[in-house]
């Protein structure tokens, strides 16, 4: 369970790196993140999976790629990841 807010069709984690804005409401939801990325640049996916097998079953049943649907930086700007690199993210 994490505190998240909705922006651009994604659940993002509240934090110093970008939100929420004044018009965005934080709520507690049970979510998970894809394995690549972190909560500062990756949207969360609603999930009630409590085991690895349950996560695999959720992913297998989905018709939406998590990488394409949850890369928050891609929705911020075309240069967002390059900006992160310059700021020392990697």
Image (cartoon, grey):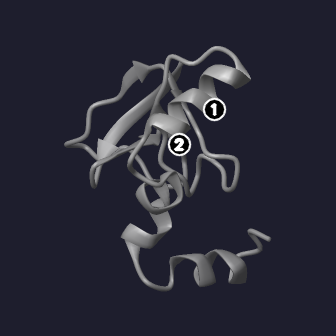
1 vs 43: above or below: above
* Relative depth, front residue between 62 and 81: 62
Label disc, if present, on residue 56 of the rendered structure = 1
Residue at 54%, 38% in the rendered image: 59
Label 2 Cα crowd, 10 Å radius (few <14 / some 14-19 / many 20+): few
Label disc, if present, on residue 48 of the rendered structure = none
| Residue under label 2 | 15
Which mark's residue is nearer the viewer, 1 or 2? 1
10 vs 87: above or below: above
Sequence-first disc among 1 and 2 = 2
Alpha carbon distance from label 1 to label 2: 28 Å
26 vs 78: above or below: above
* Quarter assignment of residue 87: bottom right
Residue at 69%, 22% in the rendered image: 53
- Quadrant of the drawing holding the C terminus: bottom right
Task: Give the structural element (helix, strand or loop) at label 1.
Answer: helix
* Quarter assignment of residue 8: bottom left
The answer to whether residue 51 is left or right of residue 72 is right
The x and y percentages for residue 25 are: 27, 32
The x and y percentages for residue 68 are: 46, 62
* Relative depth, front residue between 31 and 79: 31
Label 1 Cα crowd, 10 Å radius (few <14 / some 14-19 / many 20+): few
Task: Give the structural element (helix, strand or loop) at label 2.
Answer: loop
The x and y percentages for residue 77 are: 40, 78
Residue at 64%, 74% in the rendered image: 84
* Relative depth, front residue between 73 and 21: 73
- Quadrant of the drawing holding the N terminus: top right
The answer to whether residue 42 is left or right of residue 12 is right
């Amino acid at each position: 369970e994490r505190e998240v807010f909705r922006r651009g069709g994604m659940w993002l984690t509240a934090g110093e790196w970008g939100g929420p804005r004044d018009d965005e409401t934080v709520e507690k939801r049970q979510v998970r993140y894809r394995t690549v990325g972190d909560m500062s640049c990756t949207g969360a996916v609603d999930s009630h999976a409590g085991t690895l097998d349950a996560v695999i079953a959720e992913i297998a049943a989905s018709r939406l790629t998590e990488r394409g649907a949850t890369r928050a930086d891609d929705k911020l700007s075309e240069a967002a990841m390059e900006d992160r690199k310059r700021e020392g993210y990697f």
